[in-house]
Amino acid sequence: AVAEDFLTSLRARARAAGRTLVFAEGEDTRVQTAAVRAVTDGLYHPILLGRPDRVRAGLADVGGDGAGVTVLDPADPDRATRFGSLFTELRAGRGVGPAEGRAAAADPLLQAALMVRTGEAHGSVAGCVRTTADVVVAALWGVGTAEGIRTVSSSFYMAFPVGHDRGPSVLTFTDAGVVPEPTAEQLTEIAVAAARARRSLIGDEPRVAFLSYSSRGSAEGGSVTRVREALAGF
């Protein structure tokens, strides 16, 4: 895939899809700027969670009128009660009671994930303020894993333009943020998940490389063994 064509097609697909995305960190200036640009470019409908007066003021400060941005207060009693009941039901087996569930659901990160679960948003975006661990936990509790997925992992994509040593191309890197010491089995599962995601997002047939500090048997060690076993199981 050509990098420029990939980014252009990605935006075109987003416009055509007409999705709704919820941002848990709606009071952050970067999020507000992204929401305004999304509305201007017609990429998706943004929902920002946060204190409405601060979010609206922030949207105005970054140059947007905010008319196309939905702003919701995660602490609103009706929302906290509704999502609290859902979370209590989901975590009943873990001993979560109504009061605890209501308090947890008032957290915008968890509430955004629960909005994805209920279909009120197609996806949730977070991580510019909260940690990766917080985001992953909220996603696991609020949304859960896809069918057949046992190991939760992350991927990121790097688009290299014409003129770059690697360009034009798009590379997928996984897992750089969730599983620090994966087993051989987990490495295999991570690679499979990344390949499936790439087919969906990029649209080409993935070529997968397992990386380690050893090239073709030049070194030995526990991590090298795990990579070899993962490759054999891929």
Image (cartoon, helix red, strand yellow):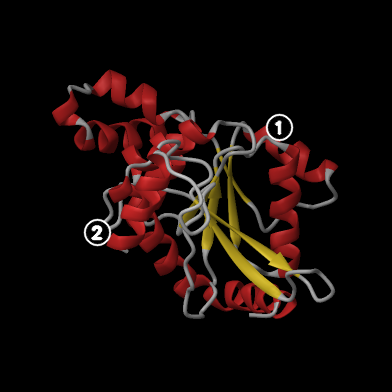
Q: Quadrant of the C terminus?
A: bottom left
Viewer-proximal residue among 207 and 17:
207
Location of residue 96 in the rendering, given as x and y in whole percent from the top left corner:
22, 23
Location of residue 131 in the rendering, given as x and y in whole percent from the top left corner:
55, 31
Horizontal arrangement in the rendering, residue 125 relative to residue 142 (left or right): right
Residue at the spot 46% in from the left edge and 43% down from the top edge: 112
Horizontal arrangement in the rendering, residue 22 relative to residue 146 (left or right): right
- The answer to whether 67 is drawn above or below residue 226 in the figure is below
* Occupied quadrant, residue 230: bottom left
Residue type of the residue flagged with mark 1: Arg
Name the disc covering residue 147, or none: 2
Viewer-proximal residue among 195 and 211:
211
Check the image and name the residue furthest to the front.
218
Horizontal arrangement in the rendering, residue 81 relative to residue 133 (left or right): left
Name the disc covering residue 54, or none: 1
Residue at the spot 64% in from the left edge and 79% down from the top edge: 9
- The answer to whether 66 is drawn above or below residue 181 in the figure is below
Q: Earlier in the sequence, mark 1 or mark 2?
A: 1
Q: Residues within 10 Å of mark 1 (few under 14, many from 20)?
A: few
